[in-house]
Image (tube, coloured by chain):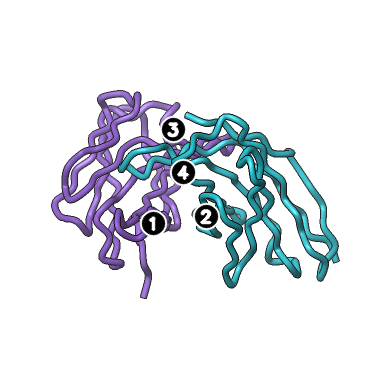
Amino acid sequence: DAKTTQPPSMDCAEGRAANLPCNHSTISGNEYVYWYRQIHSQGPQYIIHGLKNNETNEMASLIITEDRKSSTLILPHATLRDTAVYYCIVRVAGNTGKLIFGQGTTLQVKP
Amino acid sequence: DTAVSQTPKYLVTQMGNDKSIKCEQNLGHDTMYWYKQDSKKFLKIMFSYNNKELIINETVPNRFSPKSPDKAHLNLHINSLELGDSAVYFCASSSRTGGYEQYFGPGTRLTVT
């Protein structure tokens, strides 16, 4: 199973873009990168996922490098409500949908 | 309009007791999961069912037994509770045809005394 490496914590000023990096150098060609977040005491929340191309939705953008060994989650205008633990996950190949959560990055958005 | 719901939200019980946690999803998904989040906030998958068939069964003590009566429900029964079972248990669901995005319930905080 491909492992991911994320910085344990980051700060971001409210209203600025938050760029959360993730390394997944052992990712296989058919494995997707998923991002989830967990706001204190709540269940994890799906944000976005991608395979090769950059992706954007109403919550965030996902930039995947050409060699697919790393990615960046971008929250374009961070708010205080975006303070959470952000998990970068490589979904295990196969049809089980299995996710292996790491320690994640604790993002603190400051006023 | 809750998508994934769990009952109870809090569960306090004594060692040795047997307890169940229930999960229901109204998203029409075909796959459901149980996760355990321990005191160090590490989130780990325990089980998964697809259309009532067990497809993920991680290294979990056999005191834990999942049951899926239908696609919309996945229950977790725990026998002979131990102190180390204290954790937050999350249920999630996803669709094999929908990209496997998992939608999580609010969690059940289990405290064993």
Q: Earlier in the sequence, mark 3 or mark 1?
A: 1
Disc 2 chain ID: A
Name the kind of residue labelled 3 in the image: Thr
Residue under the image location 44 percent in, 52 percent down: B107
Q: In the rendered view, would you say A94 is above or below A55?
A: above
Which residue, given by chain and number where applicable, does mark 2 sit on? Answer: A49
Which residue, given by chain and number where applicable, does mark 1 sit on? Answer: B99
Which residue, given by chain and number where applicable, does mark 3 sit on? Answer: B113
Looking at the rendered structure, the secondary structure element under dot 2 is: strand
Shown colour of chain B: purple
Circles 3 and 1 on the same subunit? yes
Q: Position of residue B60 (x, y in %)?
A: 33, 26
Circles 2 and 4 on the same subunit? no
Residue under the image location 81 percent in, 70 percent down: A15
Q: Earlier in the sequence, mark 4 or mark 1?
A: 4
Which of the numbered marks, if any, corresponds to residue B24? none
Which residue, given by chain and number where applicable, does mark 4 sit on? Answer: B88
Label 3 close to label 4 by CB (< 8 Å): no
Q: Earlier in the sequence, mark 3 or mark 4?
A: 4
The one nearer the camera, A36 or B9, is: A36
Label 2 close to label 4 by CB (< 8 Å): no
Q: In the rendered view, would you say A21 is above or below B64?
A: below
Looking at the rendered structure, the secondary structure element under dot 1 is: loop
Residue under the image location 42 percent in, 37 percent down: A92
Chain letter for cyan, please.
Answer: A
Disc 4 chain ID: B
* CA distance for labels 2 and 3: 40 Å
